[in-house]
Image: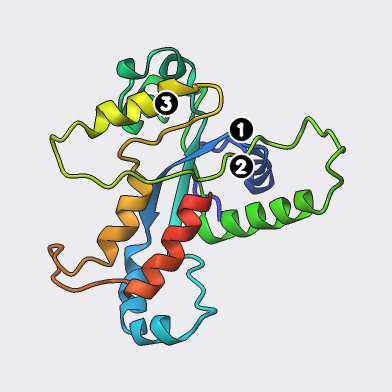
Amino acid sequence: NNNNNNNNGPNEEQIVEMILKGEISLVDIVPNQDALSRNREAKNMQQIDPDWDYAHLFKAQFCRLNWSSHERDPSTTPMFRDVIAASECGTSNDNPRLSFDLKQAVKGARKMDAAFRNKDDDDDDATIPHVLDLAGIVFHESRCGSTLVANLLQSLNPQENIVYSESGPPVTILRLADATEKARATVLSQAAAATVLQDVVYL
């Protein structure tokens, strides 16, 4: 499911390994519009089927992120898009955007995390990425000082905290379930959007 334009870039197995090791981060979600249009017709199934599978409906884009300047001084890269830009994500041959099926990436991450949880607590494996739990979400309106709050949270403990300020992937999913968007018709049911959103946040 690797649709990367660079023929010399990593293959699917290498991309999966980079994702699971935490070497690359989720920076964007690209919906498969044709597949989503067909999916709209089956939206009622999304609401009643707990095992609804959204495979092939979304491409996840990943790249290497450099958080060092944000950790030193969050005000220099206050928004997540600023961190992406400062990391030259997609603008440098050394840091291309890598595309992979969202569902497959999540399945791989959950499988690996489950295996790690079954390991002994004393098993010190340097290859295991340091996973941070979601500690909170700040809901806010525009021009209310939310960026200042985000920067303060980041600066409290920059080695342990990562704050995604106005991260694009969750918003992309929410908009697909928003009937106020241009099409005036939702593409995902609220239940389906909740499923995908949980996976996006998890990843």
Please name the residue shown 55% across and 27% down the image: 160
Categorize mark 3 by other alpha carbons within 10 Å: few (<14), some (14-19), many (20+): many
**What residue is pinned by disc 2?**
19
Amino acid, disc 1? Glu
**What residue is pinned by disc 1?**
23
In percent of width and height, residue 97 lies at 46, 36
Categorize mark 2 by other alpha carbons within 10 Å: few (<14), some (14-19), many (20+): many
Amino acid, disc 3? Gln
Please name the residue shown 51% across and 73% down the image: 53
Amino acid, disc 2? Ile
- First-in-chain label (2 vs 3): 2
**What residue is pinned by disc 3?**
154
**As displayed, is residue 94 above or below residue 104?**
above
What is the image's colouring? rainbow
Q: Is residue 3 left or right of residue 105?
A: left
Q: Are marks 2 and 3 in contact (CB under 8 Å)?
A: no
In percent of width and height, residue 100 lies at 53, 50
In percent of width and height, residue 103 lies at 54, 61
Q: Secondary structure at mark 3?
A: helix
- First-in-chain label (3 vs 1): 1
